[in-house]
Image (spheres, grey):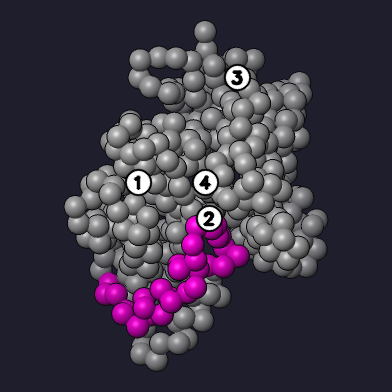
Amino acid sequence: MTERYIGLMSGTSLDGADGVLVDFAPHAGGLLRVLAHQYRPFAPALAAELLALNTPGKDELHRAALAANALARVYADVVEALLETSGTPRQEVMAIGAHGQTVRHRPQEFDGTGYTLQINSPALLAELCGIDVVADLRSRDVAAGGQGAPLVPVFHRAVFGIDGETIGVLNLGGISNLTTLGANGSVTGFDCGPGNALMDHWCQTHTGRPFDDGGAWAASGRVIAPLLNGMLTDPYFELPAPKSTGRDRFHAAWLGTHLHSVTATLEPVDVQATLAELTAACCANDVLRHAPHAAELLVCGGGARNQYLMQRLAARLPGVKVKPSDERGLPATQVEACAFAWFARAFCAREAASLASVTGARGARVLGALYPAGPPR
C-alpha cells in the first residue's frame, strides 16, 4: 500500500523548481521516503519576470498571468520527470502540493488582514499532469489573522522533532526562517531576514554568476563593519514573533540605501562578505534569542550548501552543532518540497496543517484549495 504525493517548491531565490515524489506509507525509516527528486532551473527570462513582479509595474496583471502559465509548465516538467525516473504511474499519486511563487507578502497590512500573493496556475498544472493539485496554501492562515508564513515549522516538528530535546531548524532560502522545536513539544517559528537573496543579487550583478558557489567569493573578502552594523539596525530584526518578511522589504533598493550610507570605497568582494555575515548574524542572533537551549541547528535550503556561510554560523554559535539536515536523513535541498507534499496530504485528509504558535492566526486551519485532475496531455 502506497501513499504517494508530489511536492513542488520554488522559493525566493528564484533559481528554479525542486520536486519530490514522497511515500508516506508507514515504514521503519520514519515519516516518509523520498522516491525521486528532480530540479529544473528557470529560464533567465522567467526568473527576471518573477523578480520584476515583486514590485509594481506596467501591465503587471497580464504579465503575472502569463508568468503563472510559464511556471506551471516548469512544474509539469518536474512532475513528469519524477514519474518517469521512479517508474510511478500517475494514477498512484494522490495529489501534487504546488505552493507557487511568492511575489507579494503583506499580511495584516493596509486593512488589518492584508494579503499574500503567489503566482501559480494550478488549473493548468492539473490539466498538464492529470493529477489532483493542492494550491493556495497560505491565504487561509492570513484570513484567520496569521502571517501565512513560515508554514514549514509544523512539518519540521513531524520529521525532525525528538522528545526531550530542543532543536533548531534553519531554512536558508532567499529569505531565512527559524523553527524552534522545544523539548516540551512546543513549536515556534518566524522569518529571520535575508537568506541568499541579497547575496545572489550581488553575485549576479558583479560576477555574472547566479550565486556564490560554496561562498568562495565571500570568503575571499573582508567584512565592512559600518555596512554590516547599519544593515543590522533595520527594525525588522527586533520585531517580536510572529513575523514574516520577503523581497517586499529586503531587496536591491534596501541594500542600495545602506551602501550609499557608507562613505568609504567599497570593493564588491567585501560587500559580498558583508552580506554573508549579515545572514549569519541575523540568524545566529535569533537562535541565541529564541532557541538558547538548542544543542543542534539543522540547516536546510540552498544556503546549507554554502560552506562559508555554514562556517560563519558555526563561529557565531559556539557550543551548537550546526549541520545540514542531510545528517538527519533528509537532504537540505529536499526539505521544503517534502513539506509541500506533506501539506497536500494533510489537505486531502482535511487535517489542520498550520500552527497558531508560529503564524499568530486565531487557530489551526486546513490549508489549500483543490484543483481536480484533468486528463493528462
Separation of residues labelled 4 and 3 (CA atoms): 32 Å
Q: Which mark is residue 168?
A: 1
Q: Position of residue 200 (x, y in %)?
A: 45, 62
Report whether residue 107 is seen. Answer: yes
Q: How would you rate the neighbour count of disc 2 (Cα within 10 Å): few for under 14, some for 14-19, many for 20 or more?
A: some
Residue 72 percent coordinates (x, y): 67, 40
What span is colored magenta in the figure? 221-250
Q: Counting other residues with Cα less than 10 Å from the Cα at mark 4, is it few (<14), some (14-19), or many (20 or more)?
A: many
User: What residue is shown at x 76% (from left), y 63% (from top)?
Assistant: 111
> Label 1 near label 4: C-beta < 8 Å?
no
**Residue annotated with mark 3:** 93
Q: Residue at x 56, y 44 (%)?
A: 356
Disc 1 vs disc 3: Cβ atoms closer than 8 Å? no
Of 27 and 354, which appears nearest the observer? 354
* C-alpha gap between disc 1 and disc 3: 32 Å
- Specify the amino acid type for callout 4: Ser
Read off the residue under disc 2: 242
Q: Residues within 10 Å of mark 1 (few under 14, many from 20)?
A: many
**Disc ID at residue 72:** none
Whether residue 12 appears in magenta in the rendering, the answer is no
Q: Which element carries disc 3, helix, strand or loop?
A: strand
CA distance separating discs 4 and 1: 16 Å
- Check contact, mark 2 vs mark 3: CB within 8 A: no
Q: Residue furthest bottom?
A: 263
Per the image, label 1 sits on a secondary structure element best described as: strand
Residue drawn 73% across and 41% down?
A: 121
Specify which label sits upstream in the sequence, 2 or 1. Answer: 1
Between marks 2 and 3 in the image, the one whose residue lies nearer the viewer: 2
Q: Earlier in the sequence, mark 2 or mark 3?
A: 3
Q: Main secondary structure of the magenta part?
A: loop
Check disc 4 and report the residue beneath it.
Answer: 357
Disc 3 residue type (three-letter): Val
